[in-house]
Image: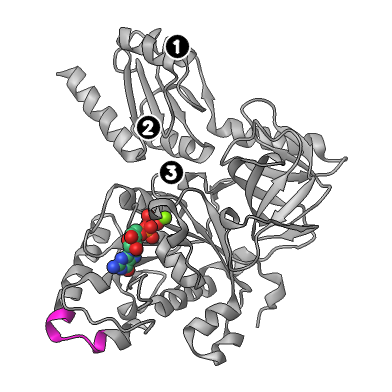
């Protein structure tokens, strides 16, 4: 049996289209009611929640399971529906060890459902699909917090048939996206087939099943990847750069490896040279709570992966969301700075030759866009994090070929002076908060030009 102490907490990312129930699902898992405190129940920020294994076992309702599981718990990341789950990157891959894709069983697939699947496929992240809102199926009689099989048995024949019909529409969509899937209790081999769990995030039906499948995936796929040395230098990803009263610019970070201590020297990616600074304070949310709802942060001296932590330090203003943060020592500082810089440069493009210009809100979304356009062999002149500036507008206007005199913006603003300039110019501007829509819009534009 593996020593539990050597395994870090897996990071679970909750993805899916806006309003399909990500926050409610996490809320149910946590047993708190954060969604009710939200403006319009829309997630405003990225947060993380650590759910210890004991709390999960409680939900499973069988204490004998406690010794069975090898991980200390699960770290859930809630990603806002229309912003930046693409910040969830780590060097060369996905930050998330596992994911949950939430689909409203009554609405089916939507743009961000497809986008979530594309990203998971690209990074080969194991995941489970949650077919949510089964309580909205006509005639459904809710059985609070029961496992799926138990609540399913209590439904009438017609309601059961309706659920199966809707479920197999979801499974059909997954198949169209290149995933073999089945209702999770009909899956015999999770390495070959995706499990779909029918749930209600509101009534809690099916939630124990989701947790079981997640823990099962952990045991199957991740054991080897989760070994870490608690003594190793901390490595993480910046989720958000946030202004906090009395603290100035702070970073919300997911630490995915090693340990981060107060007083540590850290190197963080920025638009220019990487930032080098010393950690003034580490602010951690309590277990079963969220960073963004903690009015009083709890100061800690160190955190160990995996953890969501807020970092207060001088000079964080220019830090980039989605960029790496690494602990350095006096001896290896130069090396770490070079490493962080190369991680940023891998994503950024500035060729000065003919091609489109891409601007995105985070390093992760930029990386995803560059990947998609390269796949279509579209030349890129510049790809950079940030809003569309006057300079970008001018630069795009210098490209003579109309196919490439194009500015692509993902989740970014157009500066007023850039807007004025662009109105007078022939530059094509495409903005969206859905990656593949930008790719499609561009393809459409190219077709129009060629006709
Ligand atoms: P998110 O944007 O994906 O985070 O979605 P939310 O969790 O904010 O949910 C959007 C809306 O759907 C809210 O009004 C929720 O109360 C509702 N909702 C979420 N899950 C369920 C469910 O299982 N059943 C029902 N009836 N409503 C749900
Ligand atoms: Mg939400």
Is the Cβ of the residue at disc 2 closer than 8 Å to that at disc 1?
no
Rendering quarter of residue 52: bottom right
Q: Which label is found at residue 373?
A: 2
Q: Residue at x 44, y 39 (%)?
A: 368
Q: Is residue 117 magenta?
A: no
SS for callout 1: helix
For the N terminus, the quadrant is bottom right
Is the Cβ of the residue at disc 2 closer than 8 Å to that at disc 3?
no
Q: Nearer the viewer, residue 251 or 359?
A: 251
* Residue 446 visible within the image: yes
Rendering quarter of residue 194: bottom left
The picture places residue 170, in percent across and down from the top left corner, at 24, 63
SS for callout 3: loop
- Examine the rendered structure and indicate whether residue 414 appears above or below residue 328: above
Q: Earlier in the sequence, mark 1 or mark 3?
A: 3
- Examine the rendered structure and indicate whether residue 65 appears above or below residue 269: below
Residue behind mark 1: 395
Q: Residue at x 72, y 61 (%)?
A: 304
- Quadrant of the picture in which ligand 2 is shown: bottom left
- Examine the rendered structure and indicate whether residue 361 appears above or below residue 68: above
Left or right of residue 189, residue 387 in this image: right
SS for callout 2: helix
Q: Nearer the viewer, residue 365 or 33?
A: 33
Labels 2, 1: front one: 1
- What residue span does the magenta drawing correspond to? 152-160
For the C terminus, the quadrant is top left
């Amino acid at each position: 049996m593996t020593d539990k102490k050597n395994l870090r907490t897996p990071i679970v990312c909750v993805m899916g289209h806006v309003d399909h129930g990500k926050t409610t699902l996490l809320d149910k898992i946590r047993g708190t009611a954060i969604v009710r405190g939200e403006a319009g129940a829309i997630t405003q920020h990225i947060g993380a929640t650590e759910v210890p294994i004991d709390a999960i076992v409680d939900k499973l309702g069988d204490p004998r399971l406690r010794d069975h599981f090898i991980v200390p718990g699960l770290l859930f990341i809630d990603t806002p529906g229309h912003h930046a789950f693409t910040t969830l990157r780590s060097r060369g891959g996905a930050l998330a060890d596992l994911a949950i894709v939430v689909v409203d069983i009554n609405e089916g697939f939507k743009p961000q459902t497809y986008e979530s699947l594309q990203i998971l496929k690209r990074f080969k992240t194991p995941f489970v699909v949650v077919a949510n809102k089964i309580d909205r199926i006509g005639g459904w009689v809710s059985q609070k917090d029961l496992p799926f099989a138990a609540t399913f048995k209590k439904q009438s024949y017609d309601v059961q048939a309706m659920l199966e019909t809707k479920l197999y529409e979801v499974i059909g969509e997954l198949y169209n996206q290149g995933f073999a899937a089945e209702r999770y209790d009909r899956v015999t081999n999770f390495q070959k087939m995706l499990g779909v769990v029918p749930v209600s995030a509101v009534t809690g039906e099916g939630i124990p099943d989701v947790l079981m499948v997640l823990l099962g995936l952990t045991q199957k796929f991740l054991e080897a990847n989760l070994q870490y040395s608690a003594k190793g230098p901390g490595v993480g990803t910046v989720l958000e750069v946030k202004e906090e009263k009395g603290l100035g610019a702070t970073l919300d970070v997911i630490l995915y490896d090693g340990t981060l201590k107060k007083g540590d020297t850290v190197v963080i990616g920025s638009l220019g040279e990487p930032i080098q600074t010393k950690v003034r304070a580490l602010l951690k949310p309590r277990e079963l709570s969220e960073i963004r709802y903690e009015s009083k942060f709890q100061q800690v001296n160190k955190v160990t992966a995996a953890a969501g932590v807020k970092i207060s330090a001088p000079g964080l203003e220019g830090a980039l969301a989605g960029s790496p943060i690494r602990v350095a020592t006096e001896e290896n500082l130069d090396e770490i700075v070079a490493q962080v810089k190369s991680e940023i440069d891998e994503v950024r493009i500035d060729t000065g030759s003919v091609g489109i210009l891409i601007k995105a809100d985070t390093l992760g979304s930029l990386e995803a866009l560059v990947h998609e356009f390269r796949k279509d062999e579209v030349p890129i002149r510049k790809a950079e994090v940030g809003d569309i500036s006057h300079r970008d507008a001018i630069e795009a206007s210098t490209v003579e070929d109309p196919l490439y005199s194009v500015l692509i913006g993902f989740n970014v603003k157009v500066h007023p002076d850039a807007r004025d300039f662009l109105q007078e110019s022939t530059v094509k501007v495409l903005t969206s908060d859905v990656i593949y829509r930008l790719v499609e819009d561009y393809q459409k534009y190219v077709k129009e030009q060629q006709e």
